Amino acid sequence: MKRIVVLISGQGSNLDAIVRASEAEDWPGRVVAVISNRADAGGLQRARAHGIATEVLDHKAFADRAAFDAALAGVIDAHSPDLVVLAGFMRILTPEFVARYEGRMLNVHPSLLPAFTGLHTHRRAIEQGCKVAGATVHFVCAELDHGPVVAQAVVPVLAGDDETTLAKRVLAAEHVLYPRAVGWFVKGELRLQDGRVTHLGGEPQGWFA
Ligand code: NHR
Ligand code: GAR
């Protein structure tokens, strides 16, 4: 069984989607721990409801990013993960931390990368007049939102959309996208080579949600 540790900061709806898929599809992988940098993250309750161990590590209790990341690595490694999953985790990670989990840490980002790295992706897509938006699952590398792309889902931007309505549509797409990508990883179906990710069975890695 592959051991998955999930990092969250918020409501944890992607966490929930991943846990449900892992059980329903009987993956050779399970979420063994959920770690939040915020004690009030709703995802902690969801994790407990599934009987999953939870930990809180408040970044504000540390002098700097390096100190927080070192402590975070300690908490993660205590669970011996094969895969670390960022699911709405809102702290930028240091290059040292990222190197430790190279090739075994995934993130979901709410845009079609390489467009709109960073924050406020939905607002920026609407401001730019984009007609499609979406979400990307990528391996995490030191440069923010620049890691090798595993999968992408596209949704329309509709006339009259605001940040909230677009975010909702993208999030629904993430709930299909992220479990699928994590499932591929735990089944050993992904190959990462020369900064590109291919699905060994030839499954489509991009689609319209
Ligand atoms: N770290 C590295 N090195 N590389 C990535 O690709 C990362 C990462 C850490 C998090 C998620 C990411 C996203 O999907 C992620 C990818 C937080 C921020 C941010 O600016 C940006 C991108 C992402 C996550 N965080 C502020 C900070 O100072 C805090 C914002 C807040 O607390 O609300 O860390 O979008
Ligand atoms: C998701 O839309 C995710 O893509 C985004 O936050 C939401 C988390 O939802 N991530 C980021 O913006 C990272 N900077 P969730 O907590 O319900 O999974």
Image (cartoon, rainbow, N blue to C red):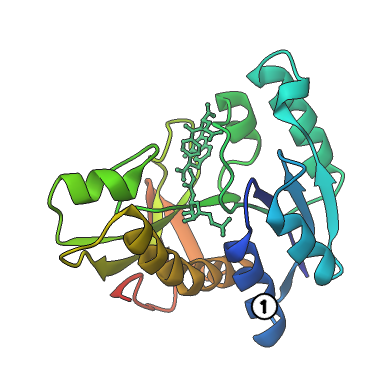
Confirm or reject: label 1 Cβ below 8 Å from ligand 2: no
Give left or right: position of 145 versus 15. left
Residue 115, compared with residue 2, is above or below; it is: above
Residue 153 at x, y = what percent?
34, 68
Q: Picture quarter containing residue 92?
A: top right
Q: Give the labeled residue for mark 1.
A: 20
Q: Is residue 75 above or below residue 125?
A: above
Q: How many marks?
A: 1
Residue drawn where x is 78% and y is 70% of the image: 1
Q: Residue 94, image x and y in percent?
A: 58, 25
Q: Foreground residue, 188 or 48?
A: 48
Residue positioned most to the top: 63
Q: Mark 1 packing: few (<14 Cα in 10 Å), some, or many (20+)?
A: some
Identify which residue is drawn at 18% across, 45% down: 127
Residue name at image x 25 percent, y 43 percent: 124
The foreground one among 209 and 204 is: 209
The residue lying at 87 percent from left, 44 percent from top is 78
Q: In this view, does 38 lie to the left or right of 101?
A: right
Kindly state the secondary structure of the residue where label 1 is placed. Answer: helix
Kind of residue at badge 1: Arg
Q: Is residue 93 above or below residue 170?
A: above
Relative to residue 22, is residue 126 drawn left or right? left
